[in-house]
Image (spheres, rainbow, N blue to C red):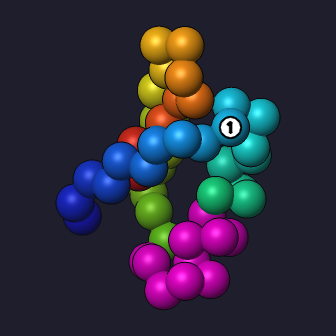
Amino acid sequence: MADLLVDNIDADIADDDIKEFLVKYGFPPFDGIEHIPGDGSRPAVLL
C-alpha cells in the first residue's frame, strides 16, 4: 500500500477517529499510523 501524509492534524486526535474519518470518505483502512510532530505548527500523520 502507498503512504499517505495527512498534515494539519491536531495531536489530540485519536487514531481511530482518523481511521473512521478517512474510511467514511472512501479511503481503504490503513495498516499502521505514524505521528510526525510539527515544527511549531500542527503535526501530521503518515498512514
Q: Is residue 21 magenta?
A: yes
Please identify the quarter of the rendering in which residue 19 is found.
bottom right
Q: Residues within 10 Å of mark 1 (few under 14, many from 20)?
A: few
Determine whether 21 is above or below 17 in the image.
below
**Horizontal and vertical percent position of residue 14:** 75, 46
Residue 37: tell me if it is visible: no
Q: Main structural element of the magenta stretch: helix, strand or loop?
A: helix
Q: Is residue 10 above or below residue 36?
A: below
Q: Nearer the viewer, residue 46 or 40?
A: 40
Mark 1: secondary structure: loop
Q: Quadrant of the N terminus?
A: bottom left
User: x, y percentage for residue 9?
Assistant: 60, 42
State which quadrant residue 31 falls in.
Answer: bottom left
The residue furthest front is 41
Q: Residue at x 55, y 13 (%)?
A: 40
User: Furthest-top residue in view?
Assistant: 39
Residue 24 seen in the current view:
yes
Q: Amino acid at mark 1?
A: Asp
- Residue at 46% x, 26% y is 36
24 relative to 28 in the view: left or right: right
Give me the residue at 48% from left, 36% from top: 44
- Residue under label 1, please give it: 10
- Based on the picture, tell me whether residue 25 belongs to the magenta stretch: yes
- Image: 24 above or below 38: below
Q: Which residues are magenta?
A: 19-28
- Against 39, is 27 above or below? below
Q: Which residue is depicted at the point 54% across and 23% down?
A: 41
Image x and y of residue 35, in percent? 52, 31
Query: Relative to the observer, which residue lies in front, 37 or 1?
Result: 37
Q: Position of residue 34 (x, y in %)?
A: 47, 35
> How many numbered marks appear?
1
